[in-house]
C-alpha cells in the first residue's frame, strides 16, 4: 500500500483510540494531469539560465545560507533575475519542460504548474526525491535520512517519519509540551525593545533542540555547531570531503538524548514508534533537526511583514489560524527551499517530444512558481487570506513544504512552532527599524536578507524620537 494511504490509516487508528476525530488531509486536486511538450534549450539559453538562476542560487547556499552572498543577492534582487530568465525560456519554447545541458548532467526545467503536478505527484514512482546533487549535499551529515533514501528502505523510513511526527494531524500529540518550550524561550525576547536576527535565531535554536531532542538538549550548542559545520560542507556537494569524525560526534550526541530514561520532545515519539533496524531512527531525527532550521527564516520574515501592517498584526494577535497563514505566506514570498529537485527513475514521455532518459534531473525553481503573476494576482504582495480560502492550497505550484508523496511530514509541527512563537512576540507592537521594503504599497522584492532585518517596539521608537 502507498505511504500516502498508510499514514491516514495510522492517524485514524490513533484518533479513534483517543476518542478524537481523525485528522483530515489538505485538499489536493484529483484526476488526470495535463502535461506539455518537452523541448531542448539552445546552448546560449542554457548558459543564460545557469548564469541568472542556478549560480546565484548556489552562491546563496542551498543547504545553509552564506550571509555575505545573501546580502549581495538581496541588494541585486537575484531571484528576480532567475524569474526573468525562466520567463524568457517560456516565451521562447512554450510552457512545456525545457531540457538544459549542464556539465556532466541533463536537467529538465519545469515551467508550468501542470508539469509540476505530474513530477511532485509521481515522486516515488517515475521520480525520486533522492536527487543526485541533493544526496551529495545531505550525505555530509545525514546519509540515511528518508529524503535521500532510494529503493526498498524508503517506504518504512517514510512511514516511520509520518508516524513519529503525527503527519498529517494538525497538532502533534506532544503539542502542549512544545507550546510550553516556545513560550519559555519567547520571554527573554520580550524583555528587549529591539530584535535582530542573531537574538531571534538563537532563541529559535533552543526551541528546536527542545522539540527534537527534549529539554535536556536546550543548552547543547555544540550539537547545533556540528550540524551547521557539516551543512556548510554540504553547500559544496561532492566537492568537499566527508568529515566522518564530526558526523559521528553529531550522531552520538543525538543518540544520547534518545537513550535517556525518559526522553523528551520528538525523541519520546521516536522511542514509542516501532522501527526495524534499517529504518535508523536517529538518522531520521537528524533530518528533522536539519530541516527545522529553515523555519526561523520564514517566521522572522513573517514578523517583519506584520511589523509594517497594523491591521494584519492586530488580527494575528487574536487569530491563530490567520497567524499560521501569515507564516505560510512568508514562505511563499521567500521560499526557504530555493529549488525543489527530483531525478527521473525511468524513461519519461511528454507529449510531442522525445523520451527523456532515466537519471535526468528535474528543476523546480520555487520563486518562479510562487510569484507567477500569470496565475497569482497576489504574486508580489502579502496575502495570507490565500491560505485560508483554499487558493494557495489548491495550487501545486505553491509548495513551501513540497507536495505529493514527498511532502514534508513535519510541516504542521513547524507551522505550530512558528505561529506560537510569533503569537508571544506580538504581545508587543513591532516596527521595522532597518531599510527593508516589507511594507504595503509596492511590490515586495523577490530576494530579501533576513540576517540584517531589525525590529523595534513602537514604545521604544516614540521614546527615541
Image (cartoon, grey):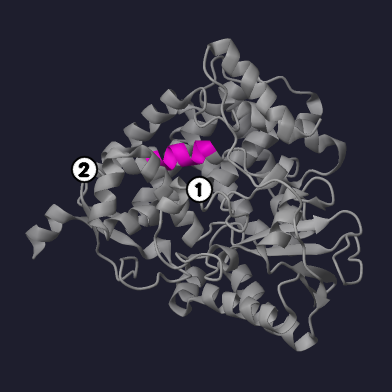
Q: In the image, which disc is placed on residue 390?
A: 1
Rendered position, 91 above or below 265 = below
For the C terminus, the quadrant is bottom left
Q: Nearer the viewer, residue 370 or 238?
A: 370
Look at 92% across and 59% down and name the residue there.
347
Q: Nearer the viewer, residue 271 or 334?
A: 334
Residue contact between numbered discs 2 and 1, judged by CB atoms under 8 Å = no
Q: Is residue 273 left or right of residue 309?
A: right
User: Number of labelled discs?
Assistant: 2
Look at 31% across and 66% down and name the residue there.
440
Measured from the top left, where is residue 373 in percent x and y?
52, 70
Specify the segment rendered in magenta. 412-419
Chief secondary structure of the magenta portion: helix
**Residue 180 shows in the view:** yes
Measured from the top left, where is residue 130 in percent x and y?
77, 50
Rendered position, 423 above or below 430 = above
Q: Could you give the CA–CA distance between mark 2 and mark 1, rounded to whole angstroms?
A: 38 Å
Amino acid at each position: 500500500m502507498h505511504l500516502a494511504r498508510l499514514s491516514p490509516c495510522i492517524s485514524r487508528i490513533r484518533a479513534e483510540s483517543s476518542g478524537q476525530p481523525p485528522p483530515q488531509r489538505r485538499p489536493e486536486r484529483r484526476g488526470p494531469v495535463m502535461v506539455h511538450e518537452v523541448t531542448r534549450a539552445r546552448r546560449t539559453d542554457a548558459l543564460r539560465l545557469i548564469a541568472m538562476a542556478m549560480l546565484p542560487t548556489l552562491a546563496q547556499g542551498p543547504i545553509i545560507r552564506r550571509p555575505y552572498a545573501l546580502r549581495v543577492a538581496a541588494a541585486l534582487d537575484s531571484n528576480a533575475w532567475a524569474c526573468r530568465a525562466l520567463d524568457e525560456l517560456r516565451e521562447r519554447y512554450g510552457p512545456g519542460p525545457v531540457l538544459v545541458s549542464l556539465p556532466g548532467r541533463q536537467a529538465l526545467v519545469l515551467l508550468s504548474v501542470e508539469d509540476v503536478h505530474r513530477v511532485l505527484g509521481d515522486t516515488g514512482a517515475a521520480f525520486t526525491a533522492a536527487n543526485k546533487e541533493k544526496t551529495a549535499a545531505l550525505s555530509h551529515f545525514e546519509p540515511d535520512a528518508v529524503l535521500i533514501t532510494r529503493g526498498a528502505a524508503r517506504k518504512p523510513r517514510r512511514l516511520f517519519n509520518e508516524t513519529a511526527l503525527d503527519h498529517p494531524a494538525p497538532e502533534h500529540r506532544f503539542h502542549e509540551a512544545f507550546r510550553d518550550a516556545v513560550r519559555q524561550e519567547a520571554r527573554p525576547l520580550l524583555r528587549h525593545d529591539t530584535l535582530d536576527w542573531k537574538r531571534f535565531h538563537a532563541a529559535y535554536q533552543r526551541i528546536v533542540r527542545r522539540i527534537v531532542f527534549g529539554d535536556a538538549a536546550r543548552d547543547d550548542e555544540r550539537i547545533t555547531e556540528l550540524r551547521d559545520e557539516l551543512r556548510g560542507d554540504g553547500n559544496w556537494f561532492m566537492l568537499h570531503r566527508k568529515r566522518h569524525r564530526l558526523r559521528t560526534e553529531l550522531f552520538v550526541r543525538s543518540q544520547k538524548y534518545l537513550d535517556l530514561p525518559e526522553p523528551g520532545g520528538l525523541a519520546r515519539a521516536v522511542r514509542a514508534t516501532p522501527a526495524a533496524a534499517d529504518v535508523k531512527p536517529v538518522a531520521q531525527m537528524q533530518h528533522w533537526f536539519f530541516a527545522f532550521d529553515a523555519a526561523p527564516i520564514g517566521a522572522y520574515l513573517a514578523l517583519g511583514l506584520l511589523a509594517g501592517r497594523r491591521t494584519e498584526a492586530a488580527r494575528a494577535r487574536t487569530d491563530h489560524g490567520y497567524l499560521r497563514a501569515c507564516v505560510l505566506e512568508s514562505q511563499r514570498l521567500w521560499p526557504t527551499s530555493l529549488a525543489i529537485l527530483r531525478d527521473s527513475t525511468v524513461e519519461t514521455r511528454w507529449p510531442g517530444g522525445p523520451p527523456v532518459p532515466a537519471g535526468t534531473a528535474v528543476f523546480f525553481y520555487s520563486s518562479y512558481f510562487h510569484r507567477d503573476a500569470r496565475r497569482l494576482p497576489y504574486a508580489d504582495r502579502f496575502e495570507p487570506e490565500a491560505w485560508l480560502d483554499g487558493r494557495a492550497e489548491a495550487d501545486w505550484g505553491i509548495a513551501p513544504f513540497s507536495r505529493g508523496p514527498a511532502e514534508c511530514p513535519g510541516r504542521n509541527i513547524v507551522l505550530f512552532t512558528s505561529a506560537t512563537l510569533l503569537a508571544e512576540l506580538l504581545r508587543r507592537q513591532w516596527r521595522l527599524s532597518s531599510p527593508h521594503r516589507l511594507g504595503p504599497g509596492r511590490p515586495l522584492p523577490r530576494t530579501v536578507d533576513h540576517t540584517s532585518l531589525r525590529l523595534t517596539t513602537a514604545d521604544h521608537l516614540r521614546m527615541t524620537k
